Amino acid sequence: MNHDSPERDPGGPGQTLRDESDEHVIKCMGDVDMGLVHGDGLKVTDSDGNEYIDAISAEWVLNLGFRNPEVKQAMVDQFEKIDYVSPVFESEVRTELAKKLAELAPGDLSKVLYGLSGASAVEGAMHLAMRTTGGTDFVCLDAAFHGRTFATIALTYVNPGMVEGANKGLDRYLPRQMRIPNYNCYRCPLGLKRETCDLACAEAIEWELDRGHLNGPAGVMVEPFQANGGMVPAPDGYLERAHEITQAHDVPLIVDEIQGALCRCGPMYATQRTEVEPEMIILGKALGGGLPLSATITTPEYSALLPWEYGFTQAGNPMACAAGLAMIEVMLRDDLPANSEKMGGLLTDGLKEIEKDSKLIGDIRGQGLMVGVELVLDRENKEPAFAEADALMAACLEHGLMIGKTGPVFGSNGNVVKFKPAVNVTEDEIVEMTDIFGRALADVEATL
């Protein structure tokens, strides 16, 4: 690693890339002064020559790490056949991936609607739900994140600390949706205790479906593990109760697994940690093996659309479908659901050892390789350690580890650091991550 000097060469490749980017690229999703130029497995190198171990799967998009050879070969093989097929025509690999997703899915999920991004797949699910139910209003959780398109902003958190000013001027485009308190047993928004709450957060769904809508309910959208909302897993029984309620009201339970699927939370689908068979599951992020691809997989009952109601020219691109199919085949062959569970347990155990001597760690929570560490200034009152989370991320980078950060309030105020390494991560790599994290945390805590 090349972390010897804090000063960047003003004429070096890193600064040149930064200057040219500032001149030509609109930065719409944050602005980290780091250019990534080479990746291999879980290792990534920046434009200044610094190497890092990537504990976030390139923003949870590369679930098999950088440049996986089998995914790469699948792209090459597809390119040698045909590199693009319009959604108007049939595509062998597009159909093959849809069949595989259906084969692995819970219940009667068998029909796939392709999109380009997570948000576009969420919109697809909304179209499908509205056409079948006749309703237009959706129940969503207050701390949820489902996208930043006009349709999905209304389903995404509104706390000013999360999206300060981001919705200004967009009001005329934003539909009204039904928000309910999110689940978060560490910071229950209802002030209850899990032992005695009777899942009051889930019961709120019923009230909204009965009384909260203006034009008829169309569905209930939940994440089985809130990622951007603070790395919070749904409590035991939550999805089951939510599904009971939606079934009683004849609306679909729409499970957003854009971040949680494909072995991230252990099973191929995060919902498979339960016995729930939802009417829709939304996929994205890693689905295309690193290429833009998303999908809603639904039951035949919720598969009707009007002609030209929804669609994207690049949806179901054969190159992305080939990459995604190869990724899934590797996951099945190498039993990566089991590896995710095992390595996630090892990671969580390592973090809990660090927690024993930590001043800042308030809570550690995870499923498979979706793990969050919430930092607090005081364990009793749980005051969020915002600045310390920023300092910890910077210290991790200095030591050569790339981690993420999130809510319970998002953006510059996040106090939950997150680990989402590739699901084929090895034990040695987990040990390396936890060792570096422990040293970086000690550096930050030494300044308190």
Image (cartoon, helix red, strand yellow):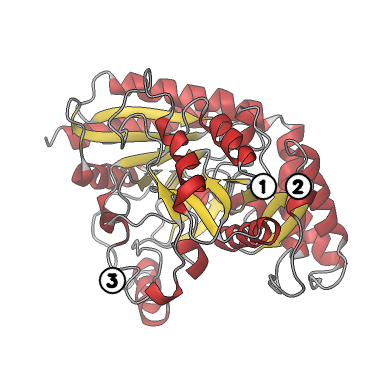
Residue 333 position within the rendered picture, expressed as x and y whole percent measured from the top left: 77, 33
Cα distance between the residues tagged 1 and 3: 51 Å
In what element is the residue under mark 3?
loop
- Mark 3 vs mark 2: give the one in front: 2
The total of numbered circles placed on residues is 3
Mark yes or no: residue 259 visible.
yes
Q: Are marks 2 and 1 in contact (CB under 8 Å)?
A: yes
For badge 3, the amino acid type reads Pro
First in sequence, mark 3 or 2: give its number: 3
| Residue wearing tag 3 | 10
For badge 1, the amino acid type reads Met
For badge 2, the amino acid type reads Thr
| Residue wearing tag 2 | 299
First in sequence, mark 2 or 1: give its number: 1
Instruction: Tell me the tag on residue 280.
Output: 1
Cα distance between the residues tagged 2 and 1: 7 Å
